[in-house]
Image: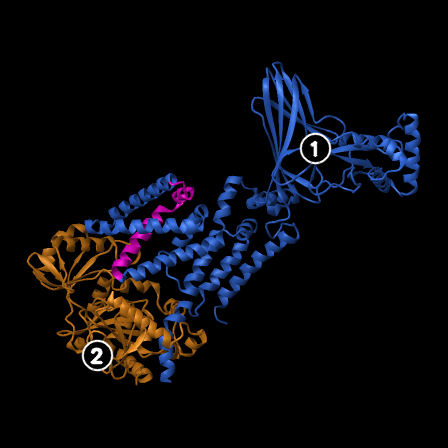
Chain colours: A blue, B orange
Amino acid sequence: MKNLHVKLLALALVACGLGLCYYKVHRLGVPLAPDSQAQVWTVEATLRFDGTGRAAKIGLDIPNEPPGFSILDENFISSGFGLSTEADGANRSAQWAARNLSGEQTLYYRLVLTEDPEAHRERTTPVPRYPEVPQYTDPERAAVFALLDNVRSRSADTPSFTQELLRRFNDPTPDTEVEVLRNESADETAQVRQLQYVLAGARIPTRIAHVLRLSESMRHGTLEPWLEVYNGERWLAFNPRNGHAGFPDDALVWHVGDAPLTRLEGANDARVEFSATRSSRDVMGLAQQRARLIDSDVLEYSLLALPIATQNVYKVLLTVPLGALVVVILRNFIGLRTFGTFMPVLIALAFRETELIWGSILFTIIVTLGLLVRFYLERLKLLLVPRLASMLTIVILIMAGVSVLAHRLGMEHGLSIALFPMVILAMTIERMSIMWDESGPRDAIMSGLGSLAVAAVGFVVMTHPLAEYLTFVFPELLLVVLALTLLAGRYTGYRLSELWRFRASAKAIARQR
Amino acid sequence: MTTLGRRLRARLRLMRHSPPLRMPSTLRALGILGMNERNGDYIGIYNDRRHYPLVDDKLKTKELALAAGIATPELYGVVEIEHQVRELDRILDGRREFVIKPAQGSGGNGIMVIADRRGVNFLRASGASVTRSELEHFISNALSGMYSLGGLPDKAIIEYRVKPHAVFDAVSYQGVPDIRTIVFRGVPVASMVRLPTRQSDGKANLHQGAIGAGIDLASGRTVDGVWFNNVLDAHPDSGNRVRGIQVPDWDELLTLAARSYDLTRLGYLGVDVVLDRDHGPLVLEYNARPGLNIQLANQMGLLSRLKQIRALAQVPDDAAARVALGQQLFGG
C-alpha cells in the first residue's frame, strides 16, 4: 500500500490521542465540551457598619457546603482587619477584628460558585434533638392539636406531613384552626418561626435555612427564609410559601438557624447587601475544579495542575498546531500563497487581542504605510540588514502612531496594535516590496491578501471556544492533529488552485484527443 | 492601463469559453501533474538533497559544467565580499555588455542585464540608464542575499551576455528566449521555449506574460504557444506565428540537457538552455524544482510520460541513447 509507513504512524497517533481522550471522558468524567449548563456565579456580600472608636469584632455567617453548588473560590476584601474563619455545626462564619474603628466601615466577602446538582445534596448534620412540645396557650393548643391530628391523618411520613401542613397554612381560604395560628401581618421569617412552633407540637425537629435567590446582575439581594425539617436521617427543605420540596436551582443556602447573620462587638448598625453576577467564561476554572474532585493521577500531571499564568500561556500555545494545520490545508489543498510559511499564524495570534475586523484593518494599515516607506527607502540604496533594521524601527513607529491616533479618536481597538509581531511585519513588508518589484503589484497584493485570508481563517479556528477548550483539556488530541498533518504531508493530489490553473489546457488536451 | 484592459478582456473571453474549475478526475484523466504530486512523488524521491547545492549555486554549476565540457555563458568574474565592489572595473575590464546575477538566485530574480555604456553610466537591456552607484548598490543587495533562496549572504556573478539566436527574433520582444527541458532519470520528457513579450517586460517568465510554446521532442519544432492560459498562434506584439519554428541544433541541445543528469545526479531536473548566436546552445541554469507551466505550454500532462520512465527498470547510461529514447517515446 502507498505510504503505508506514514499511514500506520498516523493511525498509532490517532489511537493514542483518542484513547487517552476516551479514558478521560468516560472514566474520569471530564466534560467534552465547555459545559454551558453549569453557570459560574460570582456572589458578593457587602457588610457595612459603624465603628465606635473601640476595638471591634465582626462576625458574618458565610455559606458552608451549600447544596447544589460547588465553591470554586472565595476571598475576603478587608484591609486592616485580622481575619479568621470558623465552622460551627451547619454554619461557617468569618471573623474580622480591628482596633480603633470609627466611622462607616465596609467589608466584602466574595464567592465564586458553579451550579453542581450533585454537590452536598445530602444534608445530614447536625443531628438535632427532638424538640419538647411548647407550652401553647389554651386557644393555640386546641387549634394546634386539631390541625396536627387532621394533617397526620392525611400523611404517611414527615415530608408528606410537612407538605400537608404547609398546604393548609398557605390555603387562600384557610380552616379556622389555621386562621387562629396564622399571623399574616408578620414578616416572612416570623411566619416560618410560627410554622416551626406548630411543628414542634408534633416533635418534629426544624430549622430555618436562609437562602439567597441568585439572579442575573442582582444588586441589592436579601436572604429569604426556607423551612428545613429533620426526618430522622437527613434535613429536608420545603418552600414555606407553597410546600414545594427541596431547594430551587437558584437558591444558595447562606446560613441556617435562628442566629443573626452578623454579630458585632464594639460596632453598631450592620447592614449586609448581596449582589451576584453570572458568567460562563470561566470554563477552565470548572474543569480544574472537576479535576481536583476527580483526584486522578492523569489530571495531576495535566496542564490543569500548572499555575494559572502558565496555563493561560498554554491555552494559547496549544491552539497554534491548529493554526499550522489550517496553513497546511490552505496552502497544500487550496493553493493559497502567503508570505512566509507560518507568518499568518503569528498574525492570527495577534488577532486574538484585536479581534478580526480591527486586526485586518490594522494589518492593512501597517503593511500599506510600511510599503510606502519601503519604496522610498529603495531610493536610498541601503544594504539589506540596515534596511531591515530601519524597517523594523519604522514599523514600530507606525504602530505607536496608530495607537496614539486611535486613542485620540476614541477607538480603543487601535491600541491593541501593540501586540502585532513587528519583526514578522517588517519581514513581510520587505518580501512584499521585492515581489512587487520583480513579479509586479498583482502578485504582491495577491500574496498579501492570501496571508491575511489564512490569518483570518487561522484566527477563527484557533479562537473557537471548543477548539481552545479541547486542546487545553485534552492536549493529547494534538496527536490527532499531528497525524492529520503527517497524512497531509503525503497528499499528492491536486490543489484547488490547480483545477483553475490547468482549466484551459484540460480543454485543449481533451480537444486533441 | 491599456495592457491591463487587454489582459482583463483576455481573461473574460477565457471565462466565457471554459468553466472556471475542472474536476480533479478530469485533470487526472489528462495526466496533469500537480504541485503536491511533483513535490511528493518526484522531487522528494528522485532528487537527493545532497545534490541541491550544485544547482542552487550557479557558480558551482558553472565549474561543474566546465569540467564536464558543457557549455555555459563565459564567467567574467565573481564579487564575493562587499569590498570587492570597488574592483568592479578590473572585473568588467572595459566590457560594454554583461549580466550580473546572484549565484543562488531563484526564479530569475535579481538579474541585471547591461547592454551598453553611455559615458560613466550603463544602459540596461530595457534601455534604462543605470548609474555606477546604482550598479554597485544592486551588487551589494545581491551579496546580502536579497534575491537568494533563504536570504543568506550570496555572491554576485558577472558573466557573458547571451546574444540570442535569430531564430526567435520574430516572436520575442527584447530579452532572451530560453528553452526549458524537463529531464527525468536522464531522459528528456518535455520541452518548451519561453518567449518574452512586451507584457512580460522582456522576462522569460510565463506567469508575468511571456509566451510558452511547446517543442516537439522528435523534430525540435514548436507547437502552439500559450499566453496567460490562452492558446494562441501569433505573438501578441509582432503578430508573427509562434507555431512551427525549427529550433537549430535540436539534438545537440537535448543531449546537453540529458548529460546534465550525469552532472547533477538529480532525477527530476529542469534544464534551461539559451541559443547563442555565436556559441550555440549554452546551459543557463539548472532547476531542482522545475515548475508545472511546461504542461500548459505543451498542452499535455506530464504524468503519463513520467510514469512510462518510472516503469523502466534501467535507463541507458549514454546520454545520446536517453535522448533517442525520449524522442522515440514522446516525439511526434
Q: Is residue A460 visible?
A: yes
Q: Amino acid at mark 1?
A: Leu
Query: Disc number at residue B147?
Result: none
- Magenta stretch containing residue A248, yes or no? no
Q: Nearer the viewer, residue A91 or A258?
A: A258
- Magenta stretch containing residue A410, yes or no? yes
What range is drawn magenta here? Answer: A409-438
Q: Nearer the viewer, residue B131 or B62?
A: B131
The image shows residue A117 at horizontal and vertical percentages of 70, 45
User: Residue at horizontal 25%, vertical 78%?
Assistant: B254
Contact, CB < 8 Å: mark 2 with mark 1? no
Q: Amino acid at mark 2?
A: Glu
User: Residue at horizontal 60%, vertical 52%?
Assistant: A33
Mark 2 Cα-neighbour bin, 10 Å: few <14, some 14–19, many ≥20: some
The image shows residue B217 at horizontal and vertical percentages of 28, 81
The Cα atoms of the two marked residues, 2 and 1, are separated by 100 Å
Q: Are marks 2 and 1 on the same chain?
A: no
Tell us which disc is closer to us: 2 or 1: 1
Q: Is residue A392 above or below residue A327?
A: above
The residue singled out by tag 1 in the image is A223
Q: Is residue B301 visible?
A: no
Query: Disc number at residue B252?
Result: 2
Mark 1 Cα-neighbour bin, 10 Å: few <14, some 14–19, many ≥20: many
Q: Quadrant of residue B10?
A: bottom left
